[in-house]
Amino acid sequence: MENLLLHISDSAKKRFAELPFPHRKDEFWRFGDLKSWGVDALFPFFQNHSGRNFKDLKIESLEKSLHAKNSIVLFDGQILFADLPKGVKVLSMGAAAEDFPERVKSFYGLADGKFDILQASRASAGAYVKIDDYADVELNVGIVSKLGISTAGVVFDIGRGSSLKLNRKYLAFGGSFCAVHAGFFCGEKSRLESTSVKLSEGGSRAFEREDFDIPNGVEIIDAFAQVGAAPSRQERNFEIRGADSCVDTRAFALLRGGITHDIRTRQMHRAGNSKSDLAVRAAIFDSSKLAFSGLIRVEECAQKTESYQSCRSLLMSEKALAQASPILEICANDVACSHGCTVAEPDPEELFYMFQRGLAPDSAMRLMVRSFAESTFEKLSDRENVEQIMSLIF
Amino acid sequence: MPADNPEKTEALPSALNLDRSAGDFSFAEDYAYNAGTGLNADVVRYISRVKDEDPWVLDFRLKALERFEKMANPTHWATKKLDDLDFSKIRYYLAKGEKKKRSWDEVPDDVKKTFERLGVPEQERAFLAGVEAQFDSESAYSNMKEYLQKDGVIFVDSNEGLKKYPEIFRKYFGKVIPVSDNKYSALNSAVFSGGSFIYVPKGVKVAQPLQAYFRINAESFGQFERTLIIADEGAELMYMEGCTAPRFETGTLHSAVVELVALKGAKIQYVTVQNWSNNVFNLVTKRGVAEEDAQIRWIDCNIGSGLTMKYPAVVLKGERARGEVVSIAIANNSQHQDTGAKMIHVADNTTSNITSKSVSIGDGRASYRGLVHMTSGVKNCKNNTVCDALLINSNSRTDTYPAVVCAGKNNSVQHEASVSKLSEEQIFYMRQRGLSETAAMSLAVNGFVNDLVKEFPMEYSVELKRLIELQMEGSVG
């Protein structure tokens, strides 16, 4: 079925040419850093002229640690390494188009923005991860981007009744424009516990989109951390189309060096009796900026939905900026929905308390940000993994 | 020449659907001045000529028209319903050509009857300091208590303000809301007529409210009043406006611009009860500038209209200025109440508060759309926003589109929104005690908005409760 991928790539190329770059009147890019994602800023990446001007030792050591047991490593969209536990299969996109054409089609059919379409225009780049029904597995996935334009599409086909503990690491090296699109197709009554850390080195651009397809009885516990010195954008869509499902998703961003991090989320409730809870936290240093926009939509048929969303930003400098737009669109009356949004500086009393006990200002600040970040990972069962993530961030 | 036989007027059948609500009636059209249907530069010149305006005003209008024609409808974020507005089918100026009266006895019979049925003269006698009543494009009646005139308070319609007090009017006119702020402020600037001009001198506190009543009588008509209120240092006033129109077959447009200026230590409260009929597009731009220690409060209730888009704003320009928006929106079948608030903090130690409650009935849709902006460089600013929505039927809809932009030092912004339905237990309790289902629901809705209704002057809050009860009729099932 190579023809299927060819067809997907060709039509995506056409759509990519037709679609404008993000602009002021595009509500989905409201508050976004349009300059960093405009044609002029991205042109050097397309020419592969950007180059790696910054070197982050953390990202280099992390790259080396990816080749481990129960791991898959994708290097610029190609499967570089795979050590798989029982119950997991990994296929190239070409092979997946043969074996699971409908799923591949529906995955690429989700692409509707400029940069996920860019990813679809290279439909063969990526991997298809199949988790067997009723399997109970742990898996590490590393996605490394080094090329000028580096794209990867990753499909997680999670079998019915299975349980997947997934640890992902996204590494965007300087000089690389990285566009990753991940699709999670959960089987009924499956469970997904996912942690992700995204490191973007200065001089890179990191775009990432994740779509979660959620039928009946699915449980998702998800935590995402973004650290880095490059403009990045993250789009996360939760399509809840089954009853008795529960999604708990949290994201933390540590922003330094005057960059803008863009987070867009959608909690779409298309069936009743389900629950979703989304929390975004950002600690914003220097003249960095958070642009958050989150949508909760409850369709008329989704009665008895519970859906919540919160966004809390900590301004660590006078020049830091937080822009948040939490949106509710509710078309059913028997629901419990709310959103909250706060922007504030560190509490001076808490800082004073720490200074009194001999902590230097830097350490006190770090401690404060760490405690602020910790709630993002509090629901994860693997505490060792959480400690590793925290040591990566701080 | 203005488009489409400007001088010709046609009579319409009178007294349409008298039984539905207090505002749903109209009288036959009898206009001496009619700018015709459609909008072009000739229509703008015609309006300016009829009003005998200075050349700079005509120039201002023509430039605004140019801006209006260049600007697109903001449908990239707003409802596509806006595209249903056909600007070529609207009449932009209708007036009887009579001078504004100071006594109700001199007001033409049909206009007087209109306002009597709406209870305006009665309210004036009972508790108002002054009243202005606008019938279609022009003000038909304007009066103010004598003691206020002695204090130097000015309360006239905008066109009179423009002519008699140019030194104050021109200084602030179009400064709070520039012509090109949005498509509809540009439209208003091109064809504005009527509205109030109020100036309260230094230190004068107007104890009783001033009221304006806006009435649309004609079909396929656009009302474009322009209101400018200036409270000088330490002055205080409360201004109330009410709006009604009869129900016609074709759409009607109401597109006002309201500018408030509260100078150092001044307080302005602006109360609106909007009960337009369901075919009115109510697209209003309202904004106030609060200087040092000044306060501006928008108290807003939207019950009528087919589509309302209104986001009262306060620019907190002086230190310790305070802004507040209290908003109630009731969206019944086929209505869309797209309301909200904007708070722009550009000075230190400023505070703002937004409280919004909406009720959606049947397939009605209530949207909150707001912006809280704290620019970098300001410090110690605070905002608190609370939006609560109540959904009555299973097909009702509510949306919340807030935006928060926060930078600077020691600023804090909080936003909360929640959605709920009527409590079945409450309804059951009330039904057990002999209330009908409609009465029980109406009582529950009144309870939901009660804490905000209390913010309105007492005479209005009683009327509001009655209007809410009316809206609840037929919502069961």
Image (spheres, coloured by chain):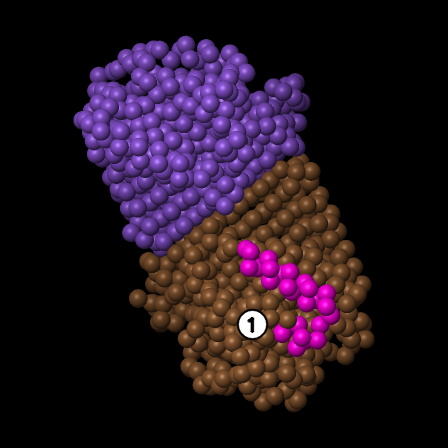
Chain (brown): B
Judged by its main secondary structure, the magenta piece is helix
- Relative placement, left or right, of B314 versus A298 is right
Whether A3 is among the magenta residues is: no
Quadrant that contains the N terminus of chain B: bottom right
Residue type highlighted by circle 1: Tyr
Name the subunit of mark 1.
Answer: B
Against B4, residue B235 (above or below) is above
Residue A174 placement (x, y as % from top left): 50, 18
Instruction: Write down the quadrant of residue A122 in the picture.
Output: top left
Chain (purple): A
Residue A394 placement (x, y as % from top left): 52, 19
Find the magenta span and give its range.
Answer: B46-71
Element at label 1: loop
Residue at (60, 81) in percent of width and height: B33
- Relative placement, left or right, of B222 versus B382 is left
Query: Which residue is outermost to the front?
Result: B1
**Depth check: B168 or B151 in front?**
B168
Against B66, residue B245 (above or below) is below
Residue A91 placement (x, y as % from top left): 24, 21
For label 1, the residue is B92
Against A175, residue B251 (above or below) is below
Residue at (46, 60) in percent of width and height: B82
Instruction: Write down the quadrant of residue A96 in the picture.
Output: top left
Q: Is residue B250 visible?
A: yes
